[in-house]
């Protein structure tokens, strides 16, 4: 097996190491210190951004045993003596260094590589090609949707001589980026999945976007695309003339002549039959999907296979076996208070690293269990592979391990050092024994290659509930967190508001993620909410806003930090601390600058300082106030007044104490609109959950929460009849009515009654008819395509919660926080 040593890496980059102690073989490229699995052979790339200085991760990684680092110019070399046994290479651009190394690695392999780009469908086309081809090929592919400037090099680094086909995806958001990715993937076969007009942002226009994407194929031999798209078709012709004359195309079309011509598409048996003409003959295939995007993706995949000279008969058989690509890591409530992470979509070493990271973030249970199938096509010798995996489990302190499959069972002794472990030859064998495991109060990661059908295990472990669910996209939440972090001035801290069950989204699930993502502070409304977080292992400082006397014990016992907002609460907390002989307890001081809700007023400042100074009972963690209308430019003058007032009051306090205090006033809207008011910290609330009244911010946020329900019954109702209580839903023409499983007890407001509100039924808007009931609502679905048990979206990506809020004359905050606790929350990562 070919391999690079640390010295080779320096040669590839054309620089002399800044410090070299040893010359290990490089096995793993690491860009995210949290994803460290095995330390041996790790090369860490210290990629810094405005928000984080990656050099800060070097010391902890070194302590864990990592020895090789690529660092940037600004690295402070005076700390080198702290890392006597480390090897350092200093470069101007760390990401570019990562890309150069991956591109060099790519050149070691001569087998075909398929490169996929496009604005939608890249990951699905990649996964489907994998499933269509994996029986006849040993395939290396991008994990999940690793298609960025960092993701692509990490994907290609997995290439190995055990493979004979690579499938990688590339995504770009700016001109010039594809030139960077081209030499890393260097595809022999190119694929354009789909070019929509979505995400043209970052490019001058669609045509420039297409031209940039085509740069991936500058040295390719074949290119597969859909010729229905005129602009794409003509841009490709032009690209061939000017840039790659030897490129052969393979196109498919529903409208014009092409290599593959679609004769008809018929929806049938919960799927689609696609009839095509190819090379003078006809054939057809079936896919178990009905939507247009799936048909489009299947035609692209079919074209790729034909271009690879694969026989139509084989294609037809494999197509009928395609399944939905479950890209997400889901966290679900399981039986006996377990949490289940279901990643039954693949079992390879990279996705195992991602899943282990997700598992370890879950701290609501101290006990962690992994159920893992045989790991297929890892590119490593089995005995090395399983030993490595076992070492990871040992390092992470895994409590229980269950291995399923003949291969992993025959390597059972690799796991000898784990305390609790069991092996089964098949999923069926395990299911028979499942009751004897007594799963309870633990987080269980299910990670299995497709053939092991781990979904049968997850079904057995999941708790069955009411079919209305609130789905929470944790990747989107993390994205939104980053979007706001990027808005912060240098050294400004971020307090994440997780009050009211994190605006309805959950408690420790959200707080744990924010802690991991790098929030500095959390804030809750009541002490009990803070206790829930502490019990789930959240360690960040937590501010409690509604401090109550009855809660002092809880506050102190769980190391929560109270907001003090009145002399009454100040004195009683002072007395409490004195009684318990507690000194220097951390508190936050709330000033009223115009909200007139809670807080000390200007005249209170001096007497307040006197109490605070007395006997050192308190440590003032921060001083803050709240803006009344930060989202509204017509109130900017008032906002300025509030800021002026705030600064004056804090200045007075700082004068008394003789030292600066940590100040904050900005909520979501102010972060972006008023960077001048960020002071030392901001308090981010609704924006995290994907809602910002500012249109530019809204475009950068991703939808976090989706409320879904299902149709329990469909009825035909004749003109003149009525629907629901009090005969409010009069039917004026013969209609079709669907009853869905959500009502005001779930948090669907009664103000949505009688047509005010609408839901999305299979992508079609259906108005509420009659009054919303306690547990159910009726929709008028006349003329719409819908069946019983179909899913209905109450709000989500296609129907924003803020839109729904306007229908009910309220705001997104109220809708989100009113979703009742009986609605099951499902968390997932993309
Ligand atoms: C809820 C709250 C916030 C967050 O407001 P958003 O508009 O959701 O960002 C900030 N500060 C205080 C005091 C709050 O109560």
Image: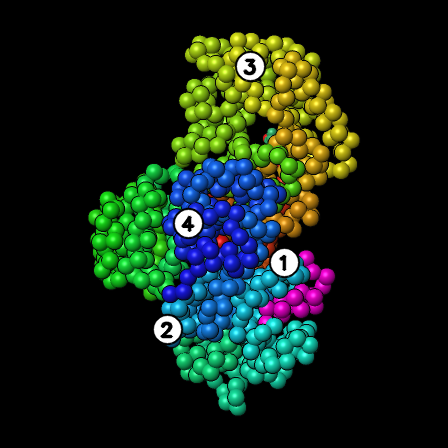
Q: Is residue 416 above or below residue 365?
A: below
4 or 3: mark nearer the eye:
4
Residue at mark 4 to residue at mark 3: CA–CA distance = 59 Å
Looking at the image, tell me whether mark 2 or mark 4 is earlier in sequence order: 4
Q: Which residue is mark 2?
A: 135
Residue 127, magenta (yes or no): no
Q: Secondary structure at mark 3?
A: helix
Q: Residue at x 29, y 43 (%)?
A: 399
Q: Which residue is mark 1?
A: 173
- x, y (%) of residue 264? 54, 80
Q: How is the image coloured?
A: rainbow
1 or 4: mark nearer the eye:
4
Residue at mark 1 to residue at mark 3: CA–CA distance = 52 Å
Q: Residues within 10 Å of mark 1 (few under 14, many from 20)?
A: some
Residue at mark 2 to residue at mark 4: CA–CA distance = 42 Å
Residue at mark 1 to residue at mark 4: CA–CA distance = 39 Å
Q: Secondary structure at mark 1?
A: loop
- x, y (%) of residue 595? 67, 26
Looking at the image, tell me whether mark 4 or mark 3 is earlier in sequence order: 4
2 or 4: mark nearer the eye:
4
Q: Quadrant of ligand 1?
A: top right
Residue 209, magenta (yes or no): yes
3 or 2: mark nearer the eye:
2
Looking at the image, tell me whether mark 1 or mark 3 is earlier in sequence order: 1
Residue at mark 3 to residue at mark 2: CA–CA distance = 70 Å
Most common secondary structure along the magenta stretch: helix
Q: In the shown orientation, is residue 265 left or right of residue 379?
A: right
Q: What range of the chain is rendered magenta?
A: 201-217
Q: Residue at x 58, y 66 (%)?
A: 182
Toward the viewer: 584 or 229? 584
Q: Which residue is mark 3?
A: 570
Q: Residues within 10 Å of mark 4 (few under 14, many from 20)?
A: some
């Amino acid at each position: 097996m070919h391999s690079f040593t640390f010295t080779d890496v320096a040669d590839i980059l054309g620089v002399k190491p800044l410090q070299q102690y040893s010359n290990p073989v490089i096995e793993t490229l690491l860009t995210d210190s949290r994803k460290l699995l095995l330390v041996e052979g790790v090369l860490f790339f210290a990629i810094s951004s405005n928000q984080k200085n990656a050099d800060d991760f070097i010391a902890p990684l070194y302590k864990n045993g990592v020895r090789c680092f690529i660092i940037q110019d600004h690295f402070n070399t005076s700390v080198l003596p702290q890392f006597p046994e480390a090897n350092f290479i200093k470069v101007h651009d760390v990401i570019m260094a990562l890309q150069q190394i991956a591109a060099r690695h790519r050149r070691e392999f001569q087998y075909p590589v398929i490169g996929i780009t496009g604005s939608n469908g890249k990951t699905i086309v990649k996964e489907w090609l994998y499933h269509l081809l994996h029986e006849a090929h040993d395939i290396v592919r991008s994990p999940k949707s690793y298609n960025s400037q960092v993701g692509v090099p990490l994907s290609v680094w997995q290439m190995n001589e055990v493979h004979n086909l690579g499938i990688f995806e590339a995504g770009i958001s700016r001109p010039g980026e594809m030139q960077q990715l081209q030499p890393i993937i260097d595809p022999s076969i190119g694929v354009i999945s789909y070019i929509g007009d979505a995400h043209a942002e970052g490019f001058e226009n669609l045509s420039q976007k297409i031209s940039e994407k085509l740069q991936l194929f500058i040295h390719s031999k074949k290119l597969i695309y859909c010729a229905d798209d005129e602009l794409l078709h003509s841009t490709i012709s032009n690209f061939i003339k000017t840039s790659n004359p030897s490129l052969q195309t393979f196109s498919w079309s529903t409208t014009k002549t092409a290599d593959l011509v679609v004769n008809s598409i018929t929806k049938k048996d919960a799927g689609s039959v696609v009839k095509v003409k190819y090379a003078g003959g006809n054939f057809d295939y079936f896919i178990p999907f009905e939507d247009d995007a799936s048909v489009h993706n299947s035609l692209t995949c079919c074209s790729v296979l034909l271009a690879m000279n694969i026989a139509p008969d084989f294609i037809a058989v494999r197509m009928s076996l395609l399944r939905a690509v479950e890209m997400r890591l889901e966290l679900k409530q399981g039986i006996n208070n377990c949490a289940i992470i279901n990643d039954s979509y693949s079992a390879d070493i990279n996705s195992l690293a991602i899943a282990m990271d997700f598992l370890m973030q879950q701290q609501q249970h101290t006990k962690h269990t992994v159920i893992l199938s045989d790991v297929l096509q890892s590119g490593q010798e089995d005995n090395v592979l399983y030993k490595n995996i076992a070492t990871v489990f040992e390092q992470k302190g895994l409590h229980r391990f269950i291995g399923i499959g003949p291969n992993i069972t025959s390597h059972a002794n690799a796991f000898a050092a784990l305390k609790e472990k069991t092996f089964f030859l098949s999923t069926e064998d395990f299911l028979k024994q499942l009751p004897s495991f007594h799963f309870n109060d633990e987080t269980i990661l299910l990670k299995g290659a497709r053939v092991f059908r781990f979904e049968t295990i997850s079904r057995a472990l999941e708790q069955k509930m009411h079919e209305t669910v609130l789905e929470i996209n944790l990747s989107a939440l993390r994205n939104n967190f980053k979007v706001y972090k990027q808005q912060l001035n240098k050294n400004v801290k971020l307090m994440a508001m997780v009050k009211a069950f994190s605006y309805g989204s959950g408690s420790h699930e959200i707080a744990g993620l924010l802690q991991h993502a790098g929030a500095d502070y959390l804030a809750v409304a009541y002490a009990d909410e803070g206790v829930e977080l502490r019990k789930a292992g959240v360690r960040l400082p937590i501010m409690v806003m509604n401090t109550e006397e009855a809660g002092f014990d809880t506050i102190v016992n769980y190391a929560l930090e109270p907001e003090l907002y009145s002399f009454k609460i100040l004195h009683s907390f002072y007395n409490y601390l004195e009684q318990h002989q507690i000194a220097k307890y951390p508190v936050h001081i709330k000033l009223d600058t115009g909200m007139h809700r809670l807080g000390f007023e200007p005249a209170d400042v001096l007497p307040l300082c006197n109490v605070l100074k007395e006997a050192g009972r308190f440590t003032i963690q921060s001083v803050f106030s709240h803006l009344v209308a930060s989202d509204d430019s017509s109130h900017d003058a008032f906002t300025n007044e509030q800021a002026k007032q705030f600064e004056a009051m804090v200045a007075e306090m700082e004068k008394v104490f003789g030292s600066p205090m940590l100040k904050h006033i900005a909520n979501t809207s102010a972060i972006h609109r008023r960077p001048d008011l960020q002071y030392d910290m901001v308090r981010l609330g609704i924006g995290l959950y994907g809602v910002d009244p500012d249109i530019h911010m809204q475009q950068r946020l991703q939808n976090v929460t989706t409320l879904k329900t299902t149709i329990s019954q469909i009825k035909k109702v004749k003109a003149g009849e009525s629907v629901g209580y009090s005969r409010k839903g009069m039917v004026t023409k013969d209609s079709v009515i669907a009853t869905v499983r959500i009502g005001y007890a779930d948090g669907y407001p009664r103000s949505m009654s009688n047509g005010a509100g609408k839901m999305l039924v299979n992508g079609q808007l259906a108005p509420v008819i009659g009054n919303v009931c306690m547990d159910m609502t009726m929709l008028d679905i006349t003329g719409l395509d819908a069946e019983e048990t179909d899913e209905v979206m109450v709000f989500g990506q296609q129907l924003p919660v803020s839109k729904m809020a306007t229908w009910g004359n309220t705001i997104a905050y109220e809708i989100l926080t009113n979703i009742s606790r009986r609605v099951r929350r499902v968390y997932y990562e993309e």
